[in-house]
Amino acid sequence: MIALEQARAHLDQLGLAQAAEVLDSRLEVASKKQLPYADFLADLLGIETSARRERYLRTRTALAHFPFQRRLEDFDFSFQPSIDERQVRELATLTWVAEASNLLLLGPPGVGKTHLAVALGLKAIEHSYGVYFMRAHDLLEDLCRAQAEHRLDRRMRVYMAPKVLVIDEFGVWPYDRLAATALFTLISARYERGSVILTSNKGFAEWGDVLGDSVIATAILDRLLHHSHVLNIRGESYRLREKRRAGLFGQPHLSEEVTPAQAS
């Protein structure tokens, strides 16, 4: 028993808390199965490794500030036939993140853009990439406030740190030239250094109106699209579908599509 307590103390001192906690039970299993010492050690360290991995994923996910957690397995591809499921599965391999490329998800409200952005963000965390999620309006307000308070460089470091920055709902609100300049500064800083996942209900031709400056909009798009994947989602809103199922609406018109002409 003294040796067992010493072993547990050593595990605690080494920071192997989960291994220390299950030491007694795993010794009992090893004894009953007459496992070789190497197998017992592999089993014990495997439990510690799994526990550390779970803690890592929980911490990284919390730091990402997702508005919800939804995975690709939860996405109803049959409801949005405009989406190439095979392409999304390929994006889930995250080769484009390793290459610091970007992903732009375009389409009307409610078609699953944010769901896909969050799901791919969770995949990135599983691949040990840092991820940070911000709604475009909040992001630009934060950058403009930091600029006014002469601490923009410090705030920029926050948005430069993650390998994947998710910017959600770009185009819902119009922005002034100060916000447009702040977005250009951020996109330029991340260009070929880190990936951006951006969701928008506006086609590219409308970005000049959203940002109030067509020159800045063109410069931002030039950097975003140089290394990028674009998913143009068409179809009905998931949320309206649920309302219709509840009997609150009749058959709706199809949501307005972000047309190829707009997305050019």
Image (cartoon, rainbow, N blue to C red):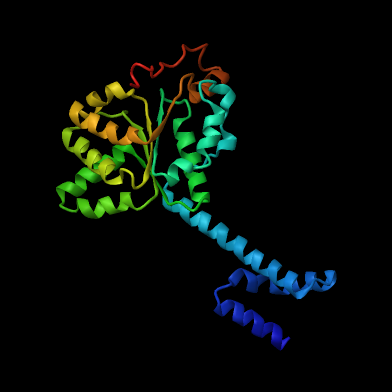
Rendered location of residue 140, percent (x, y) = 26, 40
Vertical side of 179 occupied by 153: above or below: below
Instruction: Write the residue at 29% across / 42% down.
Output: 139
> What is the residue that sits farthest to the bottom in this orientation?
2
Q: Quadrant of the C terminus?
A: top left
Residue 25 appears in the picture as rendered: no
Rendered location of residue 86, percent (x, y) = 56, 30
Q: Quadrant of the N terminus?
A: bottom right
Instruction: Write the residue at 19% across / 38% down.
Output: 181
Vertical side of 213 occupied by 51: above or below: below
Q: Is residue 56 left or right of residue 190?
A: right
The foreground one among 135 and 91 is: 91
Number of marks drawn:
0
Q: Is residue 153 left or right of residue 241?
A: left
Rendered location of residue 185, percent (x, y) = 22, 42
The foreground one among 263 and 183 is: 263
